Image (spheres, rainbow, N blue to C red):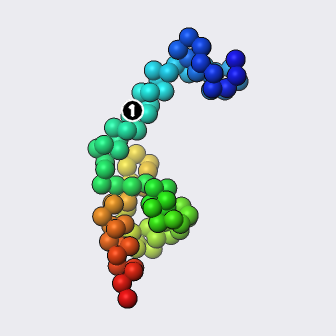
Amino acid sequence: MKRGESKGGQTWVGSEVPVNEAEMSKKSAGFNEMRRILPAFMTVPEVAHRLRVSDKTVRRLVNRRHLPRCNHLGKVLIPCAAVEKWIVDSTKN
């Protein structure tokens, strides 16, 4: 069985490790639930994508306190409103 092939409700992720499709959907459902609960926050990669810069640049902005942050379950979360405000403030002449 090759990587990514399904057989009997299982997907082969590695060379020999089957993963139950129900488990995979549970994990993605947990992530989607977090996004539903915390829609007002973005992760560092999401902010980087929004600003079209690297993750490192976003981390610099956070460390220099140009953007606020909160930590939740080991993730750095940045309020969406703060990102929008920073965009507006940085584009004023």
Residue at point 32% right, 71% down?
A: 85
Which part of the image, by quadrant, shows the C terminus?
bottom left
Q: Residue furthest bottom?
A: 93
| Residue 4 found in image quarter | top right
- Residue 57 rendering spot, x and y as whole percentages: 53, 68
- Pick whichever, 34 or 72, lies toward us: 34
Q: Position of residue 86 (x, y in %)?
A: 36, 73
In the image, is residue 88 above or below residue 31? Answer: below
Q: In this figure, what is the number of numbered marks?
A: 1
Asked whether residue 44 appears in the rendered view, the answer is no
Q: Residue 11 falls in which quadrant of the image? A: top right
What secondary structure is found at the residue carrying circle 1?
helix
* Above-or-below relation of 84 to 4: below
Residue 36 appears left or right of 61: left
Residue 1, located in which quarter of the rendered image? top right
Tell me where residue 82 appears, x and y as whole percent: 33, 67
- When the figure is inspected, residue 60 is found, relative to residue 20, above or below; the finding is below
Amino acid of disc 1? Ala
As rendered, which of 56 and 28 lies closer to the eye?
28
Question: Which residue is rendered at x = 48% and y = 27% of the image?
Answer: 24
Can residue 27 be seen from the camera position used here?
A: yes
Task: Give the residue drawn at x 56%, y 11%.
Answer: 8
Q: Residues within 10 Å of mark 1 (few under 14, many from 20)?
A: few
Tell me the residue that label 1 is attached to.
Answer: 29
